[in-house]
Amino acid sequence: MAKILVTGSNGQVGQELQFLSNGSAHTFVFTDVADLDITDYSAVNDFFKEHQFDFCLNCAAYTAVDKAESDVELATKINVDGVKNLAQACLFNQTFLMQLSTDYVYHNQQNTPFKEGDTTNPQGVYAQTKLDGDLAALQVNTASMVIRTSWVYSSFGNNFVKTMIRLGTERDSLNVVFDQIGTPTYARDLAAAMLDVVEKINNNSIPASKAYGVFHYSNEGVTSWYDFAKAIFDIENIDCNLGAIESIQYPTPAKRPPFSVLNKSKIKSELDVAVPHWRDGLVRCLEAMKG
């Protein structure tokens, strides 16, 4: 039985981990900023000494992409300094660190799914701080796993799916960008993949060293935000006229990657992690939202 720390437990992935932990034989400690401020090194170090964790799943992050452009200091403290603090504490206490990251770190002009070794080119504060956090974790503690994901949504928290349902039922028509291509990821599928890796390491079916480094996990398939919205409306029978627009017609403070499909071959072949299709994940999420 393992002792597992989950930081950022009030976020989408954190809440899904809480849901999936019900009935688990492992001991989970769920924290958010009120319980553990990861930007406070002394607090983190003391917390680790007190609990002696086997695994740390870091779901804590500054994720307000546009707000980060004017809130550089806080985004850096959470996404870089906080990660560094956790990585050091994990190193000193022989705890396996699993760090969540993002497709935003790539933002290149290629049109084939990104592999873990592809060139990074972060645009904006959020993307840069997430990449800096990845590099800090791996530099401070090589016994770390970085999981880059994309377009995360959940039955918990605020996200694109809930926004589309709300707006689609309030309005007769709605415009959504069609020229940003990627893969929606159901947070429960991501959380299940994280726990799958933890279980395999814990029961020695794979050595922990096999999971060190950068991995990709998103659901399978490829779509646009427009087609994602269309799928939501179709499944939920929402009668709203959906228009397709270019990103230039919907300007935001931070640039979004035009193409951010992730190649999952590494996590599937090396860690034997199953990856469901995005539409199947969407159906299950919509069912979960109805209770």
Image (cartoon, rainbow, N blue to C red):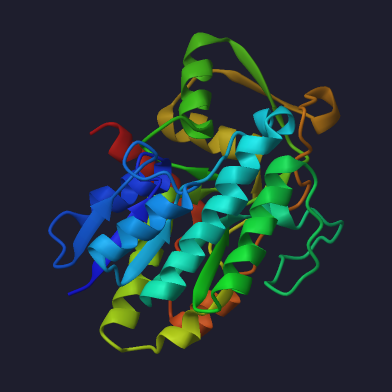
Q: Is residue 107 visible?
A: yes
Image-quadrant location for residue 276: bottom left
Q: Position of residue 92 (x, y in %)?
A: 42, 74
Question: Does 290 sit left or right of 89 as displayed?
Answer: left
**Residue under the point 49% across and 67% down:** 88
**Residue under the point 59% across and 49% down:** 79
The residue closer to the viewer here, 159 or 147, is: 147
Q: Position of residue 230 (x, y in %)?
A: 58, 33
Q: Quarter of the image containing the C terminus? A: top left
The residue closer to the viewer here, 69 or 262, is: 69
Q: Position of residue 122 (x, y in %)?
A: 78, 52
Q: Position of residue 46 (x, y in %)?
A: 33, 57
Question: Does 35 sit left or right of 271 as displayed?
Answer: left
**Residue under the point 34% across and 81% down:** 201
Q: Is residue 60 above or below residue 50?
A: above
The residue closer to the viewer here, 157 or 240, is: 157
Q: Is residue 100 visible?
A: no
